[in-house]
Amino acid sequence: MTNHDFAYRSSGTYLNVARRETAADMPFAVAGLNFDGAVSNRPGARFGPQAIRLASQMLCDAIHPYFDTSPIGLLCDAGDLALPNTGIEAMRAALMPQALALLAAHHMVWLGGDHSVTLPVLRALNQVHGGPVAMLHFDAHCDTWTNHFGEPSGHGTWVYEAMQEGLLIPAASIQIGIRSSGERDAREYVNTVGGRVFTARELRGLDSPSQLASVLAEIRNRMATAGNPPVYLTLDIDCLDPAFAPGTGTPEPGGMSAAQVLSIIEELADVNWCGMDCVEVSPPYDHAELTSNAASAFVWTYLCAQVKKRQSDASAN
C-alpha cells in the first residue's frame, strides 16, 4: 500500500523562524494541530495553522510595541503534527506522544485545529507537570456538554472531559467571553465546580487594563490561592465578535474585541504560564484575513510576554 503523507500540513513557518529540525535547542516552539474532524457546524479549521503562519509574515521584525522584545532567535517551528484527518480518538492517540516529545524540549504554542485538540494537550501537560494545571479559557462556548450531538466527545465536550479526568484545577479554571445558547447546567458547569465564568455580557465596555482591573485581579487571586500552579491558555478565536473574527466555524454575535483579549494577555504576562493554543480559525469563512491576523497577533503577544518574562527572570538571577 502506498505510504501517503498526511494531508493539509503547512509548508511555511511562524514568523519565518527556523524549522525545529535545524533549531531544536530553542526554548519556545510552535506546532500545528491541523484537525477539524470534531466540528459541529462549519469545517475548515484544519487550514488554520497555515493561515496563522501566513498572517505572521506581516509582523516583520516581530518586536512587540508593549514588551519591546521579539521571540525571533528563541523560537522554532515544529511544523504540523502528523494526525489522522477525521477520527477524534485516533487523532488524540496520535497527538499524545508527539506532544510529549515537544513539551520535553520547549515551551509550546499550538495552532489549531478545532478545540477537541486541547484535551490531549492537557493530558500531556499533566504528565509533564505531575498533576492538574490551571486554565484560562477564551471562548464563546462553554465546551462543557456531556455529549456532542449524540457522540461522546467533540469540540464542545473537552472542558467537561478534562474536569472529569482531573486534568484541571477546578478553582483555578477560568472562562472568558462565554455567550452562546445552551442549557444552564452546561453554561454554569465551571462555576458549579468552583471555577469562574466571565460572560461576554459582563465584559461589555471593558477594554483597557484599568477597566479590566477587577477581572485581572480575580484571575490573579485565584491563581495565587491555588499556589501559582502552571496555567494553560486556550484561546478559541470565536471568543471574538464575528466583526473581528468571521473566519470560524461557530460565530456568535456579541463577543469580545481584539483589544480586550490583548489587554488580558498583556497584563497577565507574569503568570506561571505553561503553554497556549489558538484554535478554531477557519480560513474558508474569513474575510480580508481578519481572523488569521487576530490569531497571529494573539500568539505573538503571548510569545513576546514569555520572552520578556524569561529576560526579567534571567536579569533577576
Image: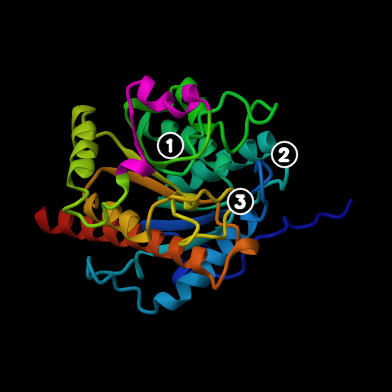
Does residue 187 belong to the magenta stretch? Answer: yes
Q: Which residues are magenta?
A: 183-202
Q: Is residue 249 visible in this depiction of the protein?
A: yes
Q: Nearer the viewer, mark 2 or mark 3?
A: 3
Q: Is residue 314 above or below residue 140?
A: below
Towards the viewer: 231 or 206:
206
Indicate the amino acid at tag 2: Gly
Q: Which residue is tagged 3?
A: 249
Evaluate whether residue 19 shows in this view: no
Is 9 left, or right, of 268 in this rendering?
Answer: right
Residue beneath the point at 20% across and 60% down: 311
Instruction: Assess whether residue 160 is covered by the magenta stretch.
Output: no
**How far, Cα to Cα, is label 1 from label 3?**
27 Å
Residue 37 rendering spot, x and y as whole percentages? 69, 44
Which image quarter: residue 29?
bottom left
- Residue indicated by mark 1: 125
**Residue 287 appears at what percent x and percent y?**
57, 69
Asked if the residues shown at circle 1 and circle 2 are in contact, with their CB atoms under 8 angstroms apart, the answer is no
Q: Which mark is residue 87?
A: 2
* SS at circle 2: loop
